[in-house]
Image: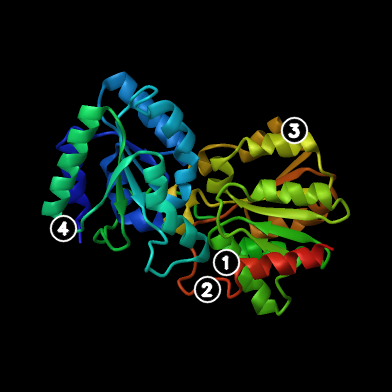
């Protein structure tokens, strides 16, 4: 396997020093190494990372480095095709894409299609790519080829990364974060415990949906009230909006995460503009991309409530302890929506956290039947 520090030194030896991207569990060891180098900016979404990298190139003439998971590649299609493409501004950059759902490798259902079409998408975009070797000598040749191509054609180049390519790496410069009383699962349990059988839940991708599923399973209460958004990070709030507008007689609770909220933050303005009285937006903020390695977000450096208030949410609440969350709930749940609640928690999840045992299409069927 590739030593993360050795590979980072390799790309730096070719003048590639600036890096940005969105964390990926498959790339977490290399991403942790980059974070320790102090030259990394974690972007809100993958398209933003492409634009940020383009800005760096325009200012310095140096090739930037962008990393992401293939599930986020869709966010890059527009800036890749209409900004950095050789037929537009012709901006070189080295992209590293984690290949979740690679054909023949077992993965979660939301990654299977993405993995199968990853190479096809790159071919359709006319982007040159290679599959990164786990052997350092071969990787050196691949990077040299990539740099030569980028310099000659002034175009992006992609390194697809298979599962298990990088050796393990433990981050040294972990950010200091508040040690809140609850973790995310604690908050999920309190929230679900307050809902009634007519309430609808849309939970964001990652461990939030897994914790919702396990809470329902432990209560033997069924899963038909919950839409478990296992993919499309950042879009759970708009799924919830579509439901709330069509089912005005049902209260709709969106369980969001700080990273997901930040990824497509403009959606909050649309929620507020539609003013659904039955919409309850809950952001469980642990200041990290917890599902893909715990890399930091800017969640603890900003005020989500003021963002929601500025967008036009009718009321805003905040809780940092279980008691606060339980005490405000009675007022929160009777407030006319759209209403916003930020729950601050510490990062981390239990190691034995399971995954939904039902297929996404089964979840969809049961959820739709419940909404009839």
Q: Residues within 10 Å of mark 2 (few under 14, many from 20)?
A: few
Residue 223 vertical placement versus 178 (above, below): below
Q: Nearer the viewer, residue 83 or 270?
A: 83
Percent across and percent down for residue 35 are 32, 45
Q: State if disc 1 and disc 2 touch (CB < 8 Å).
A: yes
Do we see residue 206 in this rendering?
yes
Percent across and percent down for residue 323 are 69, 59
Q: For the residues marked 1 and 3, what is the alpha-carbon distance in whole angstroms?
A: 31 Å
Q: Is residue 345 left or right of residue 191?
A: left
Which residue is disc 3 drawn over? Answer: 312
Which residue is disc 2 drawn over? Answer: 354
Which residue is disc 1 drawn over? Answer: 210
Query: Foreground mark, 4 or 3?
Result: 4
Query: Foreground mark, 4 or 2?
Result: 4
Which residue is disc 4 drawn over? Answer: 135
Tell me which label, 2 or 1, sits earlier in the chain: 1
Residue 31 vertical placement versus 368 (above, below): above
Quick one: SS at disc 1? Answer: helix
Quick one: SS at disc 3? Answer: loop
């Amino acid at each position: 396997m590739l030593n993360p520090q050795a590979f980072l030194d390799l790309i730096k030896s070719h003048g590639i020093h600036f890096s940005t991207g969105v964390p990926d569990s498959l790339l977490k060891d290399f991403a942790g190494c980059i974070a320790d180098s102090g030259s990394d900016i974690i972007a809100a979404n993958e398209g933003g990372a492409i634009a940020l990298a383009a800005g760096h190139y325009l200012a310095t003439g140096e090739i930037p480095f962008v990393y992401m998971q293939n599930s986020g590649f869709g966010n890059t299609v527009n800036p890749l095709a209409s900004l950095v493409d050789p037929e537009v501004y012709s901006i070189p950059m080295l992209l590293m894409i984690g290949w979740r759902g690679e054909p023949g490798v077992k993965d979660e259902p939301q990654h299977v299609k993405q993995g199968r079409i990853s190479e096809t998408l790159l071919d359709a975009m006319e982007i040159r790519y290679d599959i990164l070797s786990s052997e350092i000598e071969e990787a050196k040749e691949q990077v040299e080829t990539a740099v030569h191509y980028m310099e000659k054609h002034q175009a992006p180049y992609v390194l697809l990364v298979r599962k298990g390519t990088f050796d393990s790496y433990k981050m040294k410069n972990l950010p200091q974060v508040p040690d809140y009383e609850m973790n995310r699962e604690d908050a999920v349990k309190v929230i679900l415990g307050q809902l009634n059988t007519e309430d609808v839940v849309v939970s964001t991708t990652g461990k939030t949906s897994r914790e919702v599923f396990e809470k329902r399973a432990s209560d033997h209460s069924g899963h038909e009230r919950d839409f478990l958004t296992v993919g499309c990070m950042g879009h759970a709030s708009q799924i919830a909006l579509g439901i709330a507008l069509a089912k005005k007689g049902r209260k709709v609770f969106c369980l969001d995460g700080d990273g997901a909220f930040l990824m497509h933050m403009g959606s909050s303005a649309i929620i507020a503009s539609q003013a659904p009285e039955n919409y309850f937006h809950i952001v469980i903020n642990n200041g990290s991309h917890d599902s893909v390695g715990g890399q930091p977000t800017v969640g603890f450096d900003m005020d989500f409530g003021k963002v929601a208030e500025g967008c036009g949410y009718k009321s805003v609440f905040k809780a940092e302890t279980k008691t606060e969350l339980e005490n405000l709930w009675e007022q929160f749940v009777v407030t006319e929506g759209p209403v916003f609640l930020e729950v601050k928690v510490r990062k981390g999840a239990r190691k034995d956290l399971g995954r939904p045992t039902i297929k996404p299409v089964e979840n969809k069927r049961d959820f739709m039947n419940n909404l009839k």
